[in-house]
Image: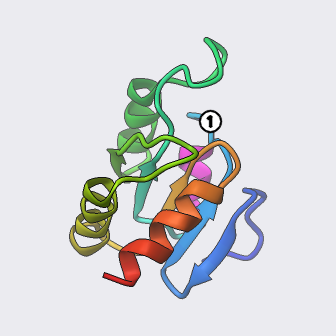
């Protein structure tokens, strides 16, 4: 990945990273940083109407040439089915992948759980 990116990215593996809430404008920067796919783990309007919607993020990701998937999960609990769905995305999507949620914590948990399957 491009080390000069100003995105608040935390690299977990060579091709998996997490970030806190991203904006539609951040999609072009993610693409410039070398990411090929984005996974959004936040439910729409989780913290009110100011949060960007998945539709707005998806449109911006597509415009930036990125694959985009929305797998909304609760911040406090990720079910075995949600972990399996996340693992499937990790297998199917082009890498490197950037996953995000409110703080990056639930995406980090999902990656750890998915990689242990």
* Residue 15 or residue 2, whichever sits in front: 15
What is the x, y in percent for residue 69? 33, 47
- The image quadrant that residue 10 belongs to is bottom right
Q: Quadrant of the C terminus?
A: bottom left
Up/down of 102 relative to 85, above or below: above
Residue annotated with mark 1: 23
Look at the magenta stretch and give its main secondary structure.
helix
Which residue is rendered at x = 29% and y = 69% of the image? 87
Which residue is rendered at x = 47% and y = 34% of the image? 57
Is residue 10 shown left or right of residue 35? right
Q: Is 44 within the magenta?
A: no
Where disc 1 sits, the SS reads loop
Which coloring applies here?
Answer: rainbow
Is residue 108 shown left or right of residue 69? right
Q: Quadrant of the N terminus?
A: bottom right
What is the x, y in percent for residue 40? 46, 46
What is the x, y in percent for residue 41? 47, 46
Q: Residue lying at the far bottom in this picture: please name it.
A: 14
Up/down of 44 relative to 88, above or below: above
What is the x, y in percent for residue 46? 57, 25
Local crowd size for mark 1, using a 10 Å CA cut-off: few (<14), some (14–19), many (≥20): some
Which residue is rendered at x = 72% and y = 56% of the image? 7
Total numbered labels: 1
Which residue is rendered at x = 50% and y = 58% of the image? 99
* Residue 20 or residue 57, whichever sits in front: 20
Is residue 19 shown left or right of residue 59? right
Up/down of 110 relative to 29, above or below: below
- What are the residue bounds of the magenta stretch? 25-32
Q: Is 28 within the magenta?
A: yes
* Residue 32 or residue 55, whichever sits in front: 55
């Amino acid at each position: 990945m491009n080390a000069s990116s100003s995105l608040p990215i935390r690299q977990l593996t060579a091709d998996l990273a997490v970030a806190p809430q991203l904006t539609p404008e951040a999609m072009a920067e993610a693409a410039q940083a070398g990411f090929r796919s984005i996974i959004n783990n936040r439910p729409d309007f989780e913290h009110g109407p100011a949060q960007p919607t998945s539709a707005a993020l998806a449109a911006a990701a597509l415009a930036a040439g990125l694959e985009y998937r929305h797998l909304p999960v609760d911040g406090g609990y990720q079910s075995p089915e949600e972990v399996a769905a996340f693992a499937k995305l990790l297998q199917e999507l082009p890498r490197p992948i950037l996953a995000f949620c409110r703080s990056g914590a639930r995406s980090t948990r999902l990656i750890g759980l998915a990689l242990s399957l």
